[in-house]
Amino acid sequence: MKLRDEHAEQAALFSWAEFARDRHPELALLFAIPNGGHRHRAVAARMKAEGVKRGVPDICLPVPRGPWHGLYIELKTDAGRVSREQRRWIGLLTLQGYRAEVCRGWQQARQLIENYLSGRTLPAGQVSKPSPTSAQEVPWTHPPAINA
């Protein structure tokens, strides 16, 4: 059996989101952040100059729910590895009041989104929960400005 890659998982999630917009109109705001993938050096340099940052989660749903300002998802396959930069971003986003999670496969991401939009929380262990201190595991070389 061929394992699905992250592209296939993310494409499946966005296909589901399009289908589910009748039930959750907020899904019209769901978007991908094109950080990953292999690019020609010139393209990568241009993207970096335009503000693309390593480790930013793959998907954003800028819809507040409960105590959260919005939802960020780092989508991985079952075998995918979460990088130090990704863990750092997830921790920092959590500290700033966003829900930020790593999901293994599109179905787990779908479940997280549905529960998030419905105001429900997933049972422990179904989605990784970074602790607020995880942002301090990998310090910024130049900390971002945080408005109090």
Image (cartoon, grey):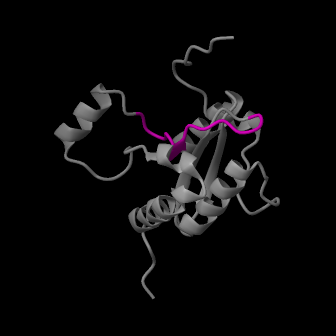
Against 94, residue 117 (above or below) is below
Against 22, residue 96 (above or below) is above
Across and down, in percent, residue 31 comes to 45, 46
Count of all numbered marks drawn on residues in the image: 0
Q: Report which quarter residue 103 is drawn in.
A: bottom right
Against 91, residue 109 (above or below) is below
Across and down, in percent, residue 23 comes to 60, 58
Q: Nearer the viewer, residue 138 or 9?
A: 9
Across and down, in percent, residue 70 comes to 62, 37
Horizontal side of 93 relative to 55 (left or right) equals right
Instruction: Residue at 77%, 37% (x, y): give it.
Output: 66
**Is residue 58 visible from the viewing direction of this image?**
no
Q: Which residue in the rendered view is the most extreme toward the bottom?
A: 1
Q: Which residue in the rendered view is the most extreme toward the front?
A: 22
Q: Report which quarter residue 86 is drawn in.
A: top right
Magenta segment: does it hold 62? yes
Instruction: Residue at 60%, 37% (x, y): give it.
Output: 88
Horizontal side of 114 relative to 73 (left or right) equals right
Across and down, in percent, residue 13 comes to 49, 62
**Is residue 114 visible from the viewing direction of this image?**
yes
Magenta segment: does it hold 98? no
Instruction: Residue at 57%, 13% (x, y): give it.
Output: 145
Q: Over which residues does the magenta segment extend?
A: 53-67
Horizontal side of 19 relative to 113 (left or right) equals left
The quadrant the N terminus occupies is: bottom left
Instruction: Tell me the chief SS of the magenta region.
Output: loop
Instruction: Residue at 68%, 31% (x, y): give it.
Output: 136
Against 11, residue 91 (above or below) is above
